Image (cartoon, grey):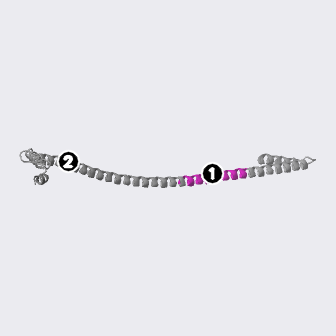
């Protein structure tokens, strides 16, 4: 039986224990001690303070981002308004330029019509003057021919009365020329 008891009483692996605590107990004790020290040194308050600071910085960043977003929206609205105003002004400028161009074309057409009317009137005046000059020249030639004919008729043997008639015809010739 000694053998059977020896077989049944084989020593198990020894678990070292210190002050009555094995490894798991010491880990638990260490964790409790660490948590106790952390509470005693007010570590949670410091962590809360750090987290509160981080939250405040994040909140400030979010507020700044919101402010920047509002400013960006205002700037966008202002730029859209300016773009619309610029477009309207450009359309007005184009319309004004077109109107000025149409006015210039109308004025140029009126000037051309007036110039053509003046030149036509001047040409008609020159034609009329040339017609009058031609008529005067034809009359002068008719008078010259008539005077020459009368002179030739009267140059023949005649009386004093014929000479007086010839002199009167000569006076008419000088008055007509």
Query: Predominant secondary structure in magenta?
Result: helix
Percent across and percent down for residue 89 are 43, 53
Residue pointed to by mark 2: 54
Q: Nearer the viewer, residue 25 or 170?
A: 25
> Which residue is depicted at the point 40% across and 55% down?
84
Compared with 16, 84 (above or below) is: below
Q: Nearer the viewer, residue 120 or 40?
A: 40
- Where disc 2 sits, the SS reads helix
> Which residue is depicted at the point 10% across and 52% down?
2
Q: Name the residue at the front extreme.
A: 1
Range of magenta residues: 103-129
Left or right placement of residue 79 versus residue 147 in this view: left
Q: Nearer the viewer, residue 172 or 148?
A: 148
> Which residue is depicted at the point 59% across and 54% down?
109
Left or right placement of residue 71 versus residue 150 in this view: left
| Dot 2 alpha-carbon crowd within 10 angstroms: few under 14, some 14 to 19, many 20 or more | few
- Where disc 1 sits, the SS reads helix
Q: Is residue 45 visible?
A: no
Gap in Å between the C-alphas at discs 2 and 1? 88 Å
> Which residue is depicted at the point 57% across and 53% down?
105
Residue 106 falls within the magenta-colored stretch: yes
Left or right placement of residue 127 versus residue 80 in this view: right
Q: In the rendered structure, which disc, 2 or 1, sits on the residue that comes first in sequence? A: 2
Q: Which mark is residue 115?
A: 1
Q: Name the residue at the left extreme.
A: 19
């Amino acid at each position: 039986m000694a053998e059977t008891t020896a077989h049944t009483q084989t020593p198990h692996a020894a678990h070292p224990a210190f002050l009555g605590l094995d490894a798991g107990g010491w880990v638990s004790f260490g964790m409790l001690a660490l948590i106790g020290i952390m509470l005693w040194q007010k570590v949670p308050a410091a962590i809360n303070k750090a987290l509160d600071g981080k939250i405040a910085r994040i909140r400030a960043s979010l507020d700044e981002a919101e402010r920047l977003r509002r400013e960006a929206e205002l700037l966008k609205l202002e730029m859209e308004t300016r773009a619309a105003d610029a477009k309207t002004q450009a359309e007005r400028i184009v319309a004004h330029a077109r109107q000025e161009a149409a006015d210039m074309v109308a004025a140029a057409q009126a000037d051309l019509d007036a110039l053509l009317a003046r030149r036509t009137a001047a040409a008609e005046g020159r034609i009329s003057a040339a017609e009058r000059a031609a008529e005067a020249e034809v009359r002068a030639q008719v008078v010259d021919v008539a005077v020459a004919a009368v002179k030739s008729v009267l140059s023949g043997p005649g009386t004093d009365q014929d000479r007086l008639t010839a002199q009167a015809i000569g006076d008419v010739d000088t008055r007509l020329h």
